[in-house]
Each structure stands twice: as C-alpha cells, then as structure tokens.
Amino acid sequence: MPGSDASGDMGVPDEFEQPGGLVALAREVLGEHPFFGVGAKGLPVSYDSTWIEAIIVAGVVGALLLLVVHVILAVRWYRLRRVLPHEEWRLAGAVVLLVWGSSFGMPSLTGNRESTLLWIFLSILVVFRRPEPSTDRTLDSAA
C-alpha cells in the first residue's frame, strides 16, 4: 500500500521509503561529506524537507544551524509574551509553529514563494519586534 511501511504504518511519504529515496541520498551524503555536505550547489533533486535539504547541502553543521534558527525563533516568540498584545502573540506563535511543522514536509525557510511569505510574517511578528511593553497589555492590567 502506498505510504505505508512493512509494519503497515501510514503517513510516511513514498519518497522516504523507496530505495534510493531522499533518506538514502542524505545517508550517502553524510557518509561522503558529513560535516559540510555537498555545498551550495546542492544536488539535482527535489528537497521535500528542510532538514534533508540542510543535511545534503550543509551536512551536520547545516542541520545544527537550522536547529539553532528554530530554537531562536521559539525562544524569541516566548520572550515576547509580555510585550505583544495577546492576539498578536498567538498569531506569532502560530507562524513559528507553522515554520517548524512545515520544515518536515517542505523547504519552509528556503523555498520560493512560501518562504518569502513566512520570513515576512516572522520579521513583522517575531524577529524585529522591540521589547517595549504594549499599551494594550498595560491598560488591561491596570483595569
């Protein structure tokens, strides 16, 4: 059955299961170029995951740096909880969660149109916010 492994589990994309798929390619790249991958030129394949792309292009170092980016975004979002209005903070959290979750199924931070839109939202909601208390929360707590 498509999308299932030998034990019958559903939800695993076929390209990750078939011999010579992306996981096998990533393992081969890790075997030959473990620390820095094959470089910015990459390989002529369609990357179906930000993590697989990071491993192939930049090796273990790239995957660790990608993890650092995700952690920084999550920590930055969490620290803004007292600064942003509640609704805006929740929207920013949804964008951070979307970036993290979608990284397993597409190159969410390095793709074309999708990543441009995500970086715009991240920039406006999380990355370039000033740590000044919002007037909305101050007024709410004073009332």
Image (cartoon, rainbow, N blue to C red):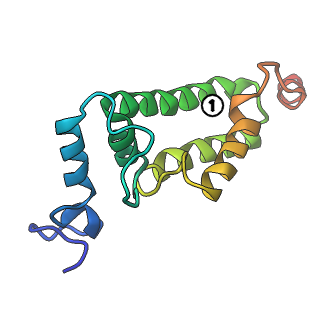
Q: Position of residue 66 (x, y in %)?
A: 45, 33
Tell me if 123 is positioned left or right of 79 in this view: right
Q: In terms of image quadrants, where is residue 58?
A: top left
Tell me if 140 is positioned left or right of 46 in this view: right
Q: Position of residue 123 (x, y in %)?
A: 72, 36
Q: Position of residue 33 (x, y in %)?
A: 24, 34
Front in this rendered view, residue 104 or 38: 38
Quadrant placement of the C terminus: top right
Residue lying furthest front: 41
Residue lying furthest left: 6
Q: How many marks?
A: 1
Tell me if 37 is positioned left or right of 76 in this view: left
Residue lying furthest bottom: 1
Question: As shown in the figure, which amino acid type bears the numbered disc 1?
Answer: Trp
Q: Is residue 29 visible?
A: yes
Rendered position, 116 above or below 12: above
The residue shown at (79%, 35%) is 85
> Residue beneath label 1, please?
77
Q: Is residue 12 visible?
A: no
The residue shown at (38%, 57%) is 44
